[in-house]
Amino acid sequence: MLSRVADNFYWMSRYIERAESLTRMVEVNQSSSLDCVEERLDEFWDPVLQAICASETFKESGKKDLVQFLFFSSGYSYSVKNCLAYARENARMVRDQLSMEMWLELNNIYLFFQSGDAEKAFLQDPQIFFQKVIRFSLVFQGLSGATIPHDEGWHFMALGTFLERADQTSRMLDTLTFQSHIPTRVDLLAVLRSCSARSAFKRQYRGELSMRNVANFLLFSQDFPRSIRFSIRCLDENLHAISGVPSGNFSNEAERLIGSSLAMVNFTDINAVLSIGLHQTIDDLQKKLMKVGQCIFETYVLLPFEIKSVNQSLTAHAQAQQQ
Amino acid sequence: MKTNVFSRYETGAFFDEMFDRGDDRLIRPHYQKILERISALNPLEYEEKRSQAVSSFLEHGVTFTVYGDSEGAERIFPFDLIPRVIPGNEWSVIERGLKQRILALNLFLNDIYHQGRILQEGVIPREIVETCPYFRKEIIGFHVPKDIYIHVCGSDLIRDEKGTYMVLEDNGRCPSGVSYVLENRDIMKRAFPRTYQSMGVRSVEAYPELLLKTLEYLSPRQSQKPVCVLLTPGVYNSAYFEHTFLARQMGIEIVEGRDLIAIDGFVYMRTTQGLVQVDVIYRRLDDDFIDPSFFRKDSVLGVPGLMDSYLKGNVALANGVGTGLADDKVTYAYVPDMIRFYLGQDPILQSVPTYLCWRDEDRKFVLENLANLVVKPANESGGYGMLIGSESTKAECNEFKKRINENPREYIAQPIISLSRHPTFCNDELAGRHIDLRPFILYGSDLEVVPGGLTRVALKKDSLVVNSSQGGGSKDTWVLKS
């Protein structure tokens, strides 16, 4: 498929996943923050802002209301409103390959935000508003599973979704390491709920709420779809579905990096992580995932613009991969 | 006659497509069945069918973008449920006339970009050709694939007060609208299935297939299945919906300039699996923008090096480069002469009498009779920048006089023709509205004219301008088998 189209698919789903994560995180923390005295509110939100790397932009913006900033600011490039606009822009370019249902969902939420209705809805009842955004993302992902062929473009969408999800889960977990105090029950629950992992966690650990268990679950759960291990495994599968090279081998740098990350999450345990330091581990992982994103782009999208002659390797490579 | 939606319909002093003029208002026989069907609808049923059509357009995303609208809003092209019907015998004349015309236009372009016989023999003044902004001296002497320049042509037809078909203009660059022809038909078949079937309407659905065959015919690599692509200016173009629609129907890639790369005289598309050589580009982008290294330097839409590959014969373009010359409304005035010159035939379809302002006599006449004329810029499309004398203020007329005097080559004038009218639903009642017709002609190994085309209707009362950008709508066009 066209490289640009692959890129559009990837970013469309990445931005949608990002909008969902951000919404869920705000939803959870806003309800926890109600338990917090007003003078200490800044302190409460600080770890969140640090984890999503938005502290400075927020300070510079001079805005008072953090939640409004995260949702509606046009100055913050990853505000939910902006994420949805980018997602829709990417979708518009590949519209002929989306199902009508997918387009309608995305277009509707986009129009909801652009028209100002979203801001009204938020002021009226934040809970209902948050649910609407989250529900959109879930419906959209359900539709992409159920209404379009699972071909190459679909695999690129999956790459966008899982790369973003792995990154977001790691950031949620990282909020615990930014706390100025030892994480409390409230903090731990907030992280789990931000990953919509509370019931899954409870089922596995029967209420043994500890930093160790939460980190273990979000990093290493085999089957919870927002755990880092689960996301990395999906990345590995989709990368190999695109190249046709069997898993366990690699034909490009993205596959090699993901393979090595997968080995890491498959064969390390929580004790090793805690001895290196949770933050350090998360930081390394995030850097690696970022590199994976770059490598996907370099391998499949960015053919050098300055190609002077078609050397054999470029086209021959294509044929080898098609077989 | 029982009371129905047609009871209060008035034809006025125009040629009406459905009714013969006169007190008894005879229905033209080819409209009998659809008239009966529509008369039998009660307002509720009609409203239901109408809203089905609207939501179907919305769902399919059949929209266009209006330039100059700050929101860049996507709009639906308004659609009227009463089809325009053309009997088979009338159509066969139109079809022959259009084929004759596209043949002559192609011979003309081939001549102009080679020997220039028609200029040497003084049939068309050389100056006219060379001052046309779309004349491309860069391709003089270049052999386009199969000697065809215009592969896809959309010539606009109108009917005057007597019902005579006339060609109003030719669109030999990137004519658009065919996606509406196909979508309109889909909706009409759903709205009036039995009437449609019983009237024996000719099908239009083969268009995408025929277009693909026309494109593949041009491929420089005949040994293998040609790789054809549709080159679009991008999502902000007013016809972007049509581009995605046609690409999907043909099963080819829709590409933007940045998806293509020209290397050593060949054009490739960038795919996730590497570079893939492209044979034929159906470009929906004007000459000016296709190659910044050749034409407009500031174009970000094109592909640097594309023209080099084209001139080397390694990639074909449809339509060819330099066809804008045939769209020039000054050239238009000479088409009947071309038909006589190249084909030795009389034109089958009439043209509208045209005054060329660069001719002193014509200009004098135009300036003195502005109130009774339509003045058009020679090289604009979409109904922009024209003056309808009878509907304009004195100031507007004076402004145009000034422009004509400053730049006579760029203006032509035509008598104001009362376009034929067609019953059309306007605010819950039937009224006569002016229409035209844009048929689509394909020129590949054969000449094919899609039976029908886009009937455009001026929805504003008394308006003569049918362009979508100027508040026009559309109707399905039913060409009958007999």
Image (cartoon, helix red, strand yellow):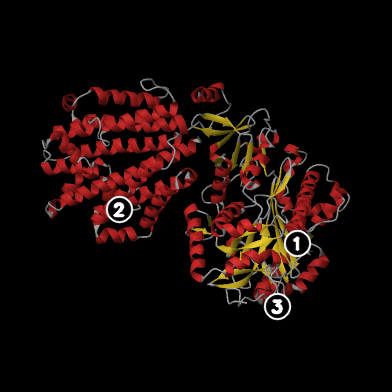
Closer-to-camera residue (B266/B478): B478
In the picture, measured across the screen, residue A96 lies left or right of residue A49, that is right
Residue labelled with disc 2: A132
| First along the sequence among labels 3 and 1 | 3
User: For the residues marked 3 and 2, what is the alpha-carbon distance in whole angstroms?
Assistant: 61 Å
Q: Output the chain of dot 1.
A: B
Q: Which mark is residue B24?
A: 3
Callout 1: SS: strand
Q: Residue furthest bottom?
A: B23
Of badges 3 and 1, the one in the foreground is 3
Location of residue A68 in the rendering, given as x and y in whole percent from the top left corner = 27, 55
Residue A55: quarter of image: top left
Callout 2: SS: helix
Of badges 3 and 2, the one in the foreground is 3
Q: Output the chain of dot 3.
A: B
Residue labelled with disc 1: B166
Callout 3: SS: loop
Location of residue A74 in the rendering, given as x and y in whole percent from the top left corner = 35, 53
User: For the residues marked 1 and 2, what is the alpha-carbon distance in whole angstroms?
Assistant: 56 Å
The C terminus of chain B, quarter of image: bottom right
Amino acid type shown at disc 3: Asp
Amino acid type shown at disc 2: Lys
* CB under 8 Å between discs 3 and 2: no
Q: Is residue A187 above or below residue A241?
A: below
Location of residue B342 in the rendering, given as x and y in whole percent from the top left corner = 85, 48
Q: Is residue A139 above or below residue A300?
A: below
In the picture, measured across the screen, residue A215 lies left or right of residue A139, that is left
Location of residue B255 in the rendering, given as x and y in whole percent from the top left corner = 55, 41
